[in-house]
């Protein structure tokens, strides 16, 4: 067939807006049909086909189709498709928003059946087909997104299963110790020294369990986007002193030399002390645990000028000469539940959550964490956080705050308070729906000389306060989460009472939810103070002295 025969071409081309003849053997093309209205759309009328294919794809096609259009329009792919077919199509959008279809049709083959010539025929998609094609592409894209979402859901499900599995193991470990040591303490009730030893071990296991639960809650808060930072005035020097005093017994047990050097110009800052303390404590405990006996642990704090006005950059360095971190494990160090396989530290308690949470906490501060380590030579962690300088009014109050905290943290306070019967003849209303919590709190108050009465919900507590004389109770210890009427609602109702003595009765909010928003909720409802469970007796004594004695 003579492909230049215009009559034949015109008869075949009624459905097309532009037709090229493509010489597949010599990589050449030329126009054989176009319309007077549209011509070739400023495209070359003839030339090297492979150059045309690349130029057209790169210059005219919408970005999402460029790569596919260029590949499908290559001579190699045309030959591959037309070897077994008479034609095939490619659909795409051009860069001014119109759908196009290019159809390749065989014109001639060689003796083996391999195509040597083809027609490249351009046509528009009419409105219905264009819409149908658009819907088809959207459906395909949605299917891809659903596949991705399904895969992510499966991965999330597996991660959740792994998380719960690890949690089950790590929670049962300290629970087993608590139950075991409590049983042994009871069995040795007539042997005070032995019973005391088991009680101490029970308390240690309880502390490990509380730390683990705190880590789980932190992960939940961070991942749900509800992790909040508190900005209260505190002293960096005091924070480091408390940190060192906290870990020193463990360091002494391993005969480590523990030094700290704080070189800061502005020690008082607005800071979430508890979270910074936990960050540094986690890193420091790792240094102690993963350093062989008679090691050296160093803490250094430096202050630098910040780029943000009113802030300083504080750099916390914790270094050791311990066993170090292997190169293979360095990339995994911040992954949840990751622990390096080293028989020398197999006995160290931990879930592998610590550094994962540390990193996420630091990122919440807008800070950075970095480390360097060499196997058998030691590790250094560097944490950098920008902290705001407080106003002069806050600086004037810091001494009072420091004194209060020192009083609350005085470890001799409990025994002195018990000996002196500091709460003698004081009456307290303990409100909690959990009998174990009631028993513990009542026993603490009674050991301090106090008198206790109890209520199992807020409504009952409200009625008891109404029933008795104005100064009958010295204070109310109110759990915030209870049935019938919770603590927040009960406190609000107490504050509405007509008797000013009753409406002004000191109320201490208590909750197992130790997060900042729970404390804020309690204080906003009218509580005078807040305590998180498990109750710290030192803090309880300090607060009772402040609000009711």
Image (spheres, rainbow, N blue to C red):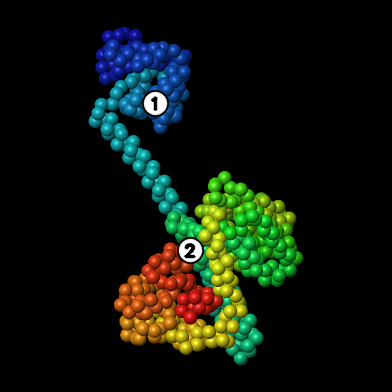
Query: Residue at the location (30% across, 18% down)?
Result: 17
Q: Quadrant of residue 248?
A: bottom right
The quadrant of the picture occupied by the N terminus is top left
- According to the picture, the residue beneath numbered tag 2 turns out to be 217
x%, y% of residue 158? 46, 57
Q: Quadrant of residue 34?
A: top left
Q: In the image shown, does 64 or 16 lie closer to the viewer? A: 64
| Above or below, 163 relative to 137 | below
Look at the numbered disc 2 and give the secondary structure of its residue: helix
Q: Quadrant of residue 60?
A: top left
| Above or below, 478 relative to 386 | below
x%, y% of residue 313? 59, 51
Look at the numbered disc 1 and give the secondary structure of its residue: loop
Viewed as shown, does residue 512 lie left or right of 206? Answer: left
Q: Which mark is residue 209?
A: none
x%, y% of residue 512? 45, 71
x%, y% of residue 391? 53, 56
Q: In the image shown, does 146 or 545 lie closer to the viewer? A: 545
> Can residue 481 be seen?
no
Farthest residue in the left direction?
A: 128
Viewed as shown, does residue 12 lie left or right of 473? Answer: left
Q: Are marks 2 and 1 in contact (CB under 8 Å)?
A: no
Q: In the image shown, does 89 or 331 lie closer to the viewer? A: 331
Viewed as shown, does residue 105 lie left or right of 225? Answer: left
How many residues crowd mark 2 within 10 Å: few (<14), some (14–19), many (20+)? some
Mark 2 / mark 1, whichever is N-terminal: 1
Query: Residue at the location (50% across, 84% down)?
Result: 423
| Above or below, 123 relative to 137 | above
- According to the picture, the residue beneath numbered tag 1 turns out to be 61
How many residues crowd mark 1 within 10 Å: few (<14), some (14–19), many (20+)? many
Query: Residue at the location (45% across, 72% down)?
Result: 529
């Amino acid at each position: 067939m003579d492909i230049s025969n215009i009559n034949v071409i015109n008869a075949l081309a009624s459905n097309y807006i532009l037709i090229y003849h493509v010489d597949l053997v010599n990589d050449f093309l030329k126009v054989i049909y176009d319309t007077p209205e549209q011509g070739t759309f400023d495209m070359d009328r003839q030339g090297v086909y492979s150059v045309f294919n690349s130029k057209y794809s790169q210059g005219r096609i919408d970005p999402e189709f460029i790569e596919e259009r260029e590949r499908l329009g290559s001579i190699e792919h045309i030959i591959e498709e037309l070897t077994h077919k008479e034609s095939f199509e490619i659909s795409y959008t051009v860069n001014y928003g119109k759908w196009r279809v290019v159809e390749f049709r065989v014109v001639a083959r060689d003796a083996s059946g391999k195509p040597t010539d083809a027609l490249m025929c351009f046509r528009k998609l009419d409105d219905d087909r264009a819409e149908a094609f658009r819907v088809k592409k959207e459906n395909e894209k949605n299917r891809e997104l659903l596949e991705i979402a399904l895969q992510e859901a499966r991965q999330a499900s597996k991660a959740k299963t792994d998380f719960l599995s690890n949690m089950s193991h790590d929670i049962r470990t300290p629970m087993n110790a608590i139950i075991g040591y409590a049983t042994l303490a009871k069995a040795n009730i007539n042997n005070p020294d032995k019973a005391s030893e088991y009680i101490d071990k029970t308390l240690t296991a309880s502390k490990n369990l509380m730390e683990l639960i705190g880590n789980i809650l932190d992960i939940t808060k961070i991942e749900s986007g509800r992790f909040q930072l508190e900005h209260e005035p505190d002293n960096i020097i005091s924070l480091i002193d408390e940190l060192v005093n906290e870990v020193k017994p463990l360091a002494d047990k391993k005969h480590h030399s523990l030094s700290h050097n704080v070189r800061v110009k502005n020690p008082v800052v607005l800071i979430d002390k508890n979270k910074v303390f936990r960050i540094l404590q986690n890193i420091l405990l790792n240094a102690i645990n993963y350093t062989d006996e008679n090691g050296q642990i160093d803490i250094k704090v430096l202050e630098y000028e910040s780029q943000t006005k009113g802030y300083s950059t504080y750099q916390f360095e914790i270094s050791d000469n311990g066993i170090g971190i292997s190169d293979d494990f360095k990339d995994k160090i911040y992954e949840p539940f990751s622990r390096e396989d080293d028989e020398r530290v197999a006995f160290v308690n931990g879930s592998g959550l610590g550094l994962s949470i540390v990193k996420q906490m630091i990122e919440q501060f807008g800070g950075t964490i970095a480390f360097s380590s060499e196997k058998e030579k030691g590790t250094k962690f560097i944490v950098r956080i920008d902290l705001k300088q407080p106003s002069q009014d806050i600086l004037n109050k810091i001494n009072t705050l420091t004194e209060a905290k020192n009083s609350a943290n005085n470890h001799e306070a409990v025994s002195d308070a018990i000996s002196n019967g500091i709460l003698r003849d004081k009456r307290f209303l303990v409100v909690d729906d959990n009998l174990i919590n009631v028993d513990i709190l009542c026993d603490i108050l009674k050991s301090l000389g106090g008198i206790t009465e109890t209520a199992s919900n807020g409504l009952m507590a409200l009625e008891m306060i109404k029933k008795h004389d104005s100064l009958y109770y010295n204070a109310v210890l109110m759990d915030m989460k209870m049935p019938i009427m919770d603590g927040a609602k009960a406190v609000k109702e107490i504050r509405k009472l007509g008797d000013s003595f009753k409406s002004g009765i000191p109320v201490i909010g208590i909750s197992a939810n130790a997060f900042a928003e729970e404390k804020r909720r309690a204080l906003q409802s009218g509580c005078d103070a807040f305590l998180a469970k498990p109750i710290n007796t030192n803090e309880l004594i300090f607060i009772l002295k402040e609000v009711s004695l």
